Amino acid sequence: MDNDKVDLYAGLGLGYRNIKWDYNGLGGDNYGSGVLLLAHVGGRYYFTDKVAGFAELGSGFGTLQLGVAFKF
C-alpha cells in the first residue's frame, strides 16, 4: 500500500489462561485452562505525524479493539 498515513500489521503472541469456578459450594472445574496462541491483524491511520487511530481484530483477550496510538 502506497500511503504514508496507513500502517497495516499482524502479530502473534502467547498467553496463559487459568479459569476455575465454584457453583454455590458444590465444587468447580477448570475450564479452558492452559497456554493460548494469540493472533491479530490491525491497522493504524495517522491523523498527524504523531497521533493515529487504530483497530485490531483477533483472538485472545478481545475480539475487536479500537484506540488511539501516540508516536514519541
Image: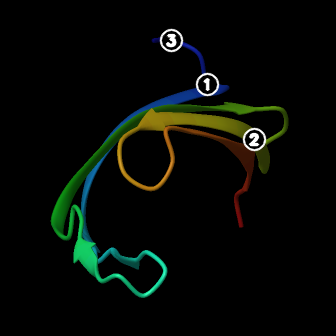
Query: Real-space Cα distance between discs 1 and 2?
Result: 12 Å
* Callout 3: SS: loop
Left of 46 or right of it: where is 18? left
Q: Dot 2: within a 10 Å radius of its alpha carbon, few (fewer than 14), some, or many (20 or more) residues?
A: some
Query: Real-space Cα distance between discs 1 and 3?
Result: 7 Å
- Residue nearest the viewer, comparing 12 with 32: 32
In this view, the mark in front (3 or 2): 2
Q: Residue 52, labelled with which disc?
A: 2
Left of 12 or right of it: where is 21? right
Q: Position of residue 5 (x, y in %)?
A: 67, 26
* Callout 2: SS: strand
Figure check: 33 above or below 28: above
Quadrant of image for the C terminus? bottom right
Q: Label 3, on which residue?
A: 2
Left of 65 or right of it: where is 14? left
Q: Earlier in the sequence, mark 1 or mark 2?
A: 1
Q: Label 1, on which residue?
A: 4
Q: Position of residue 13 (x, y in %)?
A: 26, 59
Give the residue type that dot 1 points to: Asp
Q: Dot 1: within a 10 Å radius of its alpha carbon, few (fewer than 14), some, or many (20 or more) residues?
A: few
Give the residue type that dot 2 points to: Ala
What residue appears at the point 49 percent right and 80 percent down from the top-left corner?
24
